[in-house]
Amino acid sequence: MVGVRIVEKKKKTIDLSQMASDLQGAAVGGGQGHQNHQIVHGYSLVKGKSRHAMEDYHVAEFRIVKDHEVGLFAVYDGHLGHSVAVYLQHYLFDNILNEASFWTDPTEAIGQAYLTTDATILDNAPNLGPGGSTAVTAILIDGKDLLVANVGDSRAVLSKGGVAEQLSIDHEPGQPTERNNIETRGGFVSNIPGDVPRVDGQLAVARAFGDKSLKAHLSAQPDIKSVKIDDRTDFLILASDGLWKVMQNQEAVDLVLKIQDPIAAAQQLSTEAVNRKSKDDISCIVVRFR
């Protein structure tokens, strides 16, 4: 991707090669909110067993926006290259926060930003390449209001009183609703013996950013859920399917409950996934609320 430049509809020039320069096979880190110091987060990324470069990207940061403290957390799991995931890492949250309706109707703003971001990616497909990316995003406003959105099979799981609650939906082609959506769009779902259901026999997720060759049959419409953070809320886990393929929601919650440091907790989730023979890239973010 060296030297590739992409022009958005807003005439903003993007140097994708520079954006990709921060790609790492493994990374850990974390931090805390500025106004609400009780909220701390950690992340861990581990390269999988495949021969291609790491295709997972993440965001884990706090910003001050219009006098509000906004926590931004995301896992982007690319496929057929990492270019779309790189774009999402740098621009999806900006696109969401720049929606005029974000502070009056954040659910509407998030849904619109997902679709307009996907349109920009498709417009730049000749430069970005044929691939795509799933996404699970979480926006935490003033430590009280949590908005989770996703397309694809990365997942958000909340621990409340030690009990796991899945906040996102795994968009798998074999699910009746997703299969119906694909077939209504003129596509099909195949399940080769020994394999998983795939859109048009190719992609194992029913919703994603990019994937221009499949987009007629593939949605980028997110599922969105709003949650109030209260005294019983322990932590949030965001992770790619490299974790969830080998670990149940409650298993992940039980593991994190034992570890106060969110960086150490995210690392332990990744380590456990590797120990369970996960071959995919593994990305984990843990946001602890108390």
Image (cartoon, helix red, strand yellow):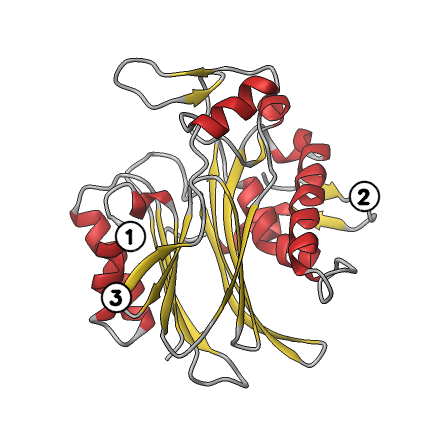
User: Mark 2: few, some, or many residues within 10 Å (few <14, many ≥20)?
Assistant: few
Q: Which mark is residue 249?
A: 1
- Quadrant for the C terminus in the image: bottom left
Q: CA distance from mark 1 to mark 2?
A: 40 Å
Amino acid type, mark 1? Asn
Label 2's element? loop
User: Mark 1: few, some, or many residues within 10 Å (few <14, many ≥20)?
Assistant: some
- Quadrant position of residue 40: bottom left
The residue that appears at 67% across and 57% down in the rendered structure is: 96
The residue that appears at 31% across and 45% down in the rendered structure is: 244
Which residue carries the number 3 mark? 256
Amino acid type, mark 2? Lys
Q: Earlier in the sequence, mark 1 or mark 3?
A: 1
**Horizontal side, residue 2 vs residue 188: left or right:** right
Residue 6 position within the rendered picture, expressed as x and y whole percent measured from the top left: 72, 42
Q: Above or below — where is 210 with respect to 31?
A: above
The residue that appears at 21% across and 63% down in the rendered structure is: 255
Q: CA distance from mark 1 to mark 3?
A: 11 Å
Instruction: State the residue in front, 28 or 173.
Output: 173
Which residue carries the number 2 mark? 9
Q: Is residue 145 visible?
A: yes
Residue 286 position within the rendered picture, expressed as x and y whole percent measured from the top left: 37, 65
Q: Earlier in the sequence, mark 2 or mark 3?
A: 2
Front disc: 2 or 3 = 3
The mark total stands at 3
